Image (cartoon, grey):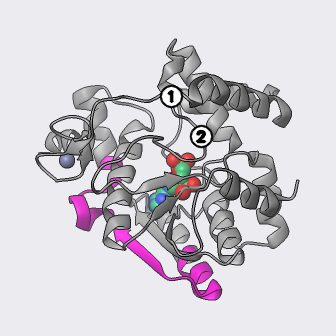
């Protein structure tokens, strides 16, 4: 597979971004976000890296140093957001408190906090879109997890542009140019390019539903993943998501479906 061409076609077909856009790429330091930043820069987009330092010990330190070097070499500006400066805590503490107080386990707490920070900072940076490195395997996991929860419609609006139909003052559109690229192909691309990055998975992600689903997915080929994602996109992709109007969180002012956003509900447990 020519990963660069697939990215180019996905961007074109789904109208993910324009050459005049300010494109903020959410960088974890892993192969997916690193590759997508590199490809979009090569295609001539005005890219800017945005990385959240989650305070996951040495793992975060190495990822941050790698991205400072990688973006420096590519001539791409990078903004590193310090989680402790933003919310007063590192992610492990936040996850531990929420697991204890609310029984929220897995990757959901981290995901909510990351999305809250990414939207805030993308807006501060004047972004037109935020790019994430989600690939075909991530999307297959989402479909299967929704299916196993018995709630296929959770995938309403799924596609390379997240939150289809979600618009609201202050919401920065998130897009996934690697939506149709299998993880194995991103890995091959990243290794072929010789990116000097870490290939380990997040040290916090263990014993979760997502991890179990990923392991189970080992029996699927890339063609099957494409069929699963394509098939479900055809069915639920066109469905409208939650129709309730987006409003502003009354505590932080971020885009929210409820009176108080999910991130503020998390932050209130930390007090
Ligand atoms: P994950 O949820 O860790 O699988 O990451 C999915 C995508 O979210 C990555 O490809 C990045 O685009 C983005 N992302 C994950 N972690 C971070 C981080 N610490 N800072 C900025 N973006 C991130
Ligand atoms: Zn809020």
Viewer-proximal residue, 170 or 88?
Answer: 170
Q: Under tag 1, what secondary structure?
A: loop
In reply to whether residue 44 is colored magenta, the answer given is no
Q: Which residue is mark 1?
A: 156
Alpha carbon of mark 2 to alpha carbon of mark 1: how far? 9 Å
Side (left or right) of 61 relative to 3: left
Q: Residue at left 81%, top 26%?
A: 219
Q: Secondary structure at mark 2?
A: loop
Residue at 40% x, 37% y: name it. Answer: 108
The answer to whether residue 109 is above or below residue 115 is: above
Determine crowd level at label 2: few under 14, some 14-19, many 20+ residues with C-alpha closer than 10 A. many
Q: Position of residue 241 (x, y in %)?
A: 43, 30
**Mark 1, other Cα within 10 Å: few <14 / some 14–19 / many ≥20:** some
Q: Which residue is at a point 11% across and 49% down the rendered structure image?
A: 251
Q: Please indicate whether residue 81 sits to the left or right of residue 102 in the image.
A: right
Where residue 64 sits: x, y (%)?
A: 50, 72
Q: Start and end of the magenta stretch? A: 67-93
Q: Disc 1, ligand 1: is the CB inside 8 Å?
A: no
**Residue 134: percent from the left, percent from the top?**
60, 49
90 magenta-colored:
yes
Q: Nearer the viewer, residue 141 or 25?
A: 25
Q: How many marks?
A: 2
In the rendered image of this protein, does residue 55 appear above or below residue 107?
Answer: below
Q: Which mark is residue 159?
A: 2
The answer to which image quadrant residue 127 occupies is bottom left
Using the rendered image of the protein, determine whether residue 203 is visible from the camera's viewpoint: no
Is residue 131 at all visible to an observer of this figure? yes
The answer to which of 230 and 252 lies nearer the viewer is 230
Specify the label residue 250 is tagged with.
none
| Residue 211 at x, y percent in the picture | 59, 33
């Amino acid at each position: 597979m020519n990963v660069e061409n697939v990215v180019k076609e996905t961007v074109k077909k789904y109208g993910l971004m324009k050459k005049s856009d300010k494109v903020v790429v959410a960088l974890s330091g892993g192969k997916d976000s690193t590759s997508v930043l590199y490809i979009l820069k090569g295609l001539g987009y005005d890219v800017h890296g945005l990385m959240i330092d989650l305070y996951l010990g040495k793992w975060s330190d190495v990822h941050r140093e790698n991205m400072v070097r990688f973006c420096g070499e590519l001539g791409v500006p990078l903004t590193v957001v310090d989680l402790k400066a933003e919310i007063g805590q590192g992610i492990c503490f936040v996850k531990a408190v929420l697991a204890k107080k609310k029984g929220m386990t897995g990757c959901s707490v981290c995901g909510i906090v990351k999305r809250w920070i990414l939207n805030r900072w993308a807006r501060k940076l004047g972004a037109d879109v935020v790019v994430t490195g989600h690939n075909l395997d991530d999307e297959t996991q989402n479909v299967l997890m929704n299916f196993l929860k018995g709630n296929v419609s959770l995938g309403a609006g799924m596609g390379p542009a997240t939150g289809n139909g979600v618009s609201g003052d202050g919401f920065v559109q998130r897009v996934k140019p690697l939506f149709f690229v299998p993880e194995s192909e991103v890995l091959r691309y990243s290794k072929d390019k010789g990116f000097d990055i870490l290939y380990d998975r997040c040290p916090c992600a263990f014993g979760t539903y997502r991890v179990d689903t990923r392991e189970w997915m080992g029996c699927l080929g890339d063609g099957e993943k494409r069929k699963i994602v394509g098939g479900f996109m055809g069915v639920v992709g066109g469905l409208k998501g939650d129709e309730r109007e987006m409003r502003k969180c009354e505590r932080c002012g971020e885009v929210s479906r409820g009176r108080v956003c999910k991130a503020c509900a998390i932050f209130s447990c930390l007090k």
